[in-house]
Amino acid sequence: MSGSSRRLRSAAGIVAAFVIALGVLPTGMMAQDGPLGVGIVVAPENGIWSCAGSTPEAAFGCARRECRTAGEADCYRTAWCYPGGWGALYSQRTAEFHGPNGFCGAPSREEALATVERWCRSQDYLVSCFVSTIITPDGTEEDVEVEFKFDR
């Protein structure tokens, strides 16, 4: 067998091994192509969680696992955005009650915060809203402390 023939067979073997390896790798280990979506799950009166994923099932499954890991039994899907865009997780407060809320799909970080303020200001029964988390377009959560108070 000539030297070039051996090199060709060796290269073909490497390519074949690579293709086989790709076929057996779990999907999560391969790079994500395209935009991610964001799923938001809430446990009423107790907490809110978000996760990024390529499908609603993946994102909501992740967020529900986080919710249940926190000890919650009732973990409800509340929002799915694809692509995820910017978002916020926040607490809305009345004189007697507070509860979690969240959204995604804003075009920028600034617009995500402005959306929380506008929505909270438009609800006459709310005395404040406290943003605890900003969601980035790739689904990363950034801890923040932004409070909007209203004289009511």
Image: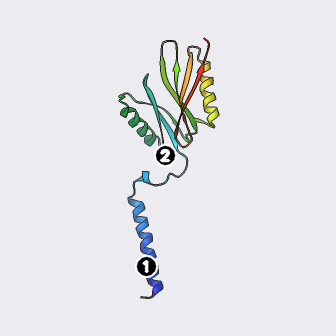
Up/down of 13 relative to 24, above or below: below
In the rendered structure, which amino acid carries the disc numbered 1? Arg
User: Whole-Å distance between the Cαs marked 2 and 1?
Assistant: 38 Å
* Residue type highlighted by circle 2: Ser
Identify the mark at residue 28; answer none if there is no mark: none
Drawn side of residue 83 relative to residue 3, left or right: right
Is the residue under label 1 in contact with that under label 2 (CB below 8 Å)? no
Q: Residues within 10 Å of mark 2 (few under 14, many from 20)?
A: some
The residue where tag 2 is placed is 54
Give the residue at x 48% y 37%.
Answer: 39
Q: Quadrant of residue 22?
A: bottom left
Determine if residue 140 is in view.
yes
SS label for mark 1: helix
Secondary structure of the residue carrying tag 2 is: loop
Circle number at residue 9:
1
The residue located at (48%, 25%) in the rendering is 100
Image coordinates for residue 26, horizontal then vertical, percent: 39, 54
17 w.r.t. 45: above or below = below
- Give the mark, 2 or 1, whose residue is nearer the N terminus: 1
Q: Residue at x 46, y 86 (%)?
A: 3
- Position of residue 20 relative to residue 147, above or below, is below
Q: Is residue 12 left or right of residue 136?
A: left
Q: Position of residue 68 (x, y in %)?
A: 36, 33
Total of numbered circles in the picture?
A: 2
| Horizontal and vertical percent position of residue 148 | 60, 22
Quadrant occupied by the N terminus: bottom left
Nearest the viewer among 148 and 24 is 148
- Which quadrant is the C terminus positioned in? top right
